[in-house]
Amino acid sequence: MKFRSISGVSPAVPFREALFRGLAPDGTLYVPETIPPLPPRFFEAHPSTSFPEVATAVIAGFAGDIPETEISRIVRAAISFPVPLIQIEEGLYVLELFHGPTLAFKDIGVRFMAQTLSAFLAKEGGHLTILTATSGDTGGAVAHGFHGVPNISAYLLYPAGRVSRIQEQQMTTLGGNIHAMEVDGTFDDCQKLIKETLLDPDVVLARRLTTANSINIGRLLPQVAYYIWADLQLRMLFDRHNPVIVVPSGNLGNLTAALYAKNMGIAAEGFVAATNENKVLVDYLSTGSVVPTAPVHTYSSAMDVGNPNNISRIQNLFGNNFEFLRSVLSAVSISDEETSDEIQRTFERSGYLLDPHTAVGIRAARIEKGKRGNTPFIVPATAHPAKFPEIVEQATGSPVTMPKELRAILTKPKQSMQIGADYQAWKGIILRNRA
């Protein structure tokens, strides 16, 4: 298995090189040359099957340059927490992806990536710099996933005033090899700075660079596993399952992973991208044109993306056949008012607390559910509700219990550097700071 750039200009490379590069030399994203299907017998659900076993099988299909025994070791070290499928109402399920150290789904991909890079560096030597743009949860996951990892430093660029206090504390209180950069701009400004850096020959010559955003295929592939895991869990509950999968969507990495899972063999009836008021994908599926916009700040801030990178991977997966894509994928935009209302509604109906991002997904699922009869719906629960206490408490009128992982960081001093969204100034910082 090799990975090629979307443009096809850069040569195809094995998994290790795509992982270390992050972005192809021609400036486009890496995609697998093929999506390897899992054998039909793999989907004969058995209660003894574990999530690490599923993740190992999925990743081994793509990363042929790593022995499967090593992939298994890395996965078990990285993902040592549960990934339960929870029924909250008749026919409506959430896949809880927030039981990792930073209580967000991104722990799964980031921790796998950190462990894999560390394993390669232990054999090869050298130092690696991780560059990450974040609209919220990615920053905390990268900070904790890479903190203290030998021979690696990480720079986290986040938009000032556009992440929650808890999200900011998670990425700005560790210090050491973790450098938090508070950017006067939007997430898209942060992402643009990262992409320019990865393609700047001056910086590339001075530092070995990669990114831990879903730009990086190494971040994306572990996320494929949890959709296959959800499919297996549902098969144990139903003879007829074929769910609709509704994905809270921002930069579209999670959605891309779900669509890759379909090509690997999950029996999904359809896919719905649930966006907030940043609805580039919704408009694209309506008009056929991708028109980037300035991001709008919403309650579901990690999805405030006006120029989603992974849309090109999705187009590529469908052979740039727009009608084929629309036959598989639909999209719904959910307002802040609807998000707040859904948090309240779900809590009153079932006692289940949603974070704002998962609430976007649940509201979209309710809209689509009315059109599809008894079809089960699965929504990835992307973050613990306690990461957004003000929004959740305002919606429900009830206090949110703060997990000990979050209480511990609230009193720690913030360590960050404020910078403008100016590439030359940022370039000077990254070249001067050798840590």
Image (cartoon, rainbow, N blue to C red):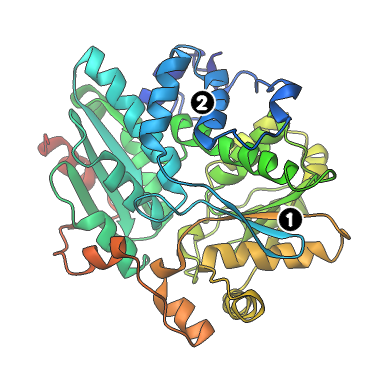
Q: Looking at the image, which is closer to me, 373 or 46?
A: 46
In this view, 132 is above or below 187: above
Position in image of residue 90 (x %, y %) = 76, 65
- Could you say whether the residue bearing mark 2 is in a helix, strand or loop? helix
Badges 2 and 1: C-beta atoms under 8 Å apart? no
Q: Looking at the image, which is closer to me, 183 or 337?
A: 337
Residue 109 located left or right of residue 381:
left
Q: Which residue is mark 2?
A: 56
Residue 431 located left or right of residue 109:
left
| Image quadrant where one finds the C terminus | top left
Residue 423 visible in the displayed image: no
Residue 293 visible in the displayed image: yes
Residue at image position (39%, 66%) is 387
Q: Amino acid at mark 1?
A: Phe
- Could you say whether the residue bearing mark 1 is in a helix, strand or loop? strand
Residue at image position (22%, 40%) is 427
Residue 403 located left or right of residue 97:
left
Position in image of residue 270 (x %, y %) = 78, 46
